[in-house]
């Protein structure tokens, strides 16, 4: 590994930001110009399934994805807490092929690989930007017809709107504390750099 200031560049398209207390790993893509392109999906967008179980994926979310770098298709996969997630095609391929992190036992590795591929499906949006959700997927993820799409850095999560509002209610105070601390850390670092 070659370190440069507070950054460490590693093989396999991983970007590491080292800090006083922790190391944070980010997925990256290198452009031919040498510029780093990170996925940064943000926002919350409420939509309703139509009569054919099609879900509109907001243009505001789709426009945040560099199609050349991340692909025009998506993988729909089960994520943490049973939440359905949409990953840009090329990014999901990196996750799936990375293997089971930190799992030495062969049976854990096999289970990770089996479920990673079995519970994911490559999907393409139609011309109107809609995604077809099968009845099986809706039941498995317990999705109603009123959904909120949430940009979460490198993927889009599909939430029942009612569940998303409850999640916000339960977690907003902790988030407010975390964002205040993160901002203070950045301001302190900028202040130290100005003093140099």
Image: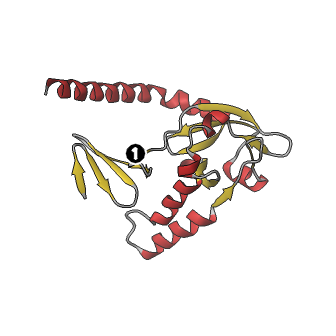
> Residue 149: image x %, image y %?
63, 37
Which of the pair 66/10 is nearer the observer? Answer: 66
How packed mark 1 is, by other alpha carbons closer than 10 Å (few <14, some 14-19, many 20 or more), is few
> Residue 110: image x %, image y %?
50, 73
Which of the pair 37/86 is nearer the observer? Answer: 37
Residue at image coords 42%, 25%: 176
Residue 122 quadrant: bottom right
Which colour assignment does the render follow?
secondary structure
Which of the pair 192/96 is nearer the observer? Answer: 192
> Residue 29: image x %, image y %?
44, 51
Q: Secondary structure at mark 1?
A: loop
Residue at image coords 49%, 44%: 39
> Residue 26: image x %, image y %?
40, 48
Residue 150 lies left or right of residue 135; in this view the side is left
Residue 20 lies left or right of residue 48; in this view the side is left
Residue 75 lies left or right of residue 18; in this view the side is right
Q: Is residue 21 at all visible to an observer of this figure?
A: yes
Give the farthest residue toward the front: 33
Question: Quick one: quadrant of the C terminus?
Answer: top left
Give the farthest residue toward the left: 196
Residue 45 quadrant: top right
| 181, above or below 61, in the image | above
Give the farthest residue toward the bottom: 106
| 187, above or below 149, in the image | above
Residue at image coords 80%, 45%: 53
Residue beneath disc 1? 35
Residue 191 quadrant: top left
Which of the pair 130/135 is nearer the observer? Answer: 130
Residue at image coords 78%, 39%: 49
Q: Is residue 79 at all visible to an observer of this figure?
A: no
């Amino acid at each position: 590994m070659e370190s440069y200031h507070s950054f460490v560049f590693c093989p396999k398209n991983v970007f590491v930001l080292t800090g006083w207390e922790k190391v944070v790993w980010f997925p990256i893509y290198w452009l031919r110009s040498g510029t780093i392109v990170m996925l940064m999906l943000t926002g919350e967008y409420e939509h309703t399934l139509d009569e054919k179980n099609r879900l509109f994926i907001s243009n505001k979310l789709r426009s945040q994805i560099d199609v050349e770098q991340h692909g025009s298709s998506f993988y729909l996969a089960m994520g943490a807490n049973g939440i359905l997630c949409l990953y840009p095609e090329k990014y999901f391929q990196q996750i799936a092929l990375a293997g089971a992190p930190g799992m030495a036992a062969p049976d854990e590795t096999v289970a990770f690989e089996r479920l990673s591929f079995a519970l994911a499906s490559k999907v393409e949006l139609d011309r109107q930007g809609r995604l077809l959700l099968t009845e099986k997927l809706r039941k498995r993820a317990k999705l109603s017809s009123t959904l909120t799409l949430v940009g979460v850095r490198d993927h889009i999560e599909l939430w029942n709107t009612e569940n998303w509002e409850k999640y916000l209610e339960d977690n907003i105070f902790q988030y407010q504390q975390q964002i205040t601390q993160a901002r203070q850390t950045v301001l302190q670092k900028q202040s130290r750099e100005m003093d140099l």
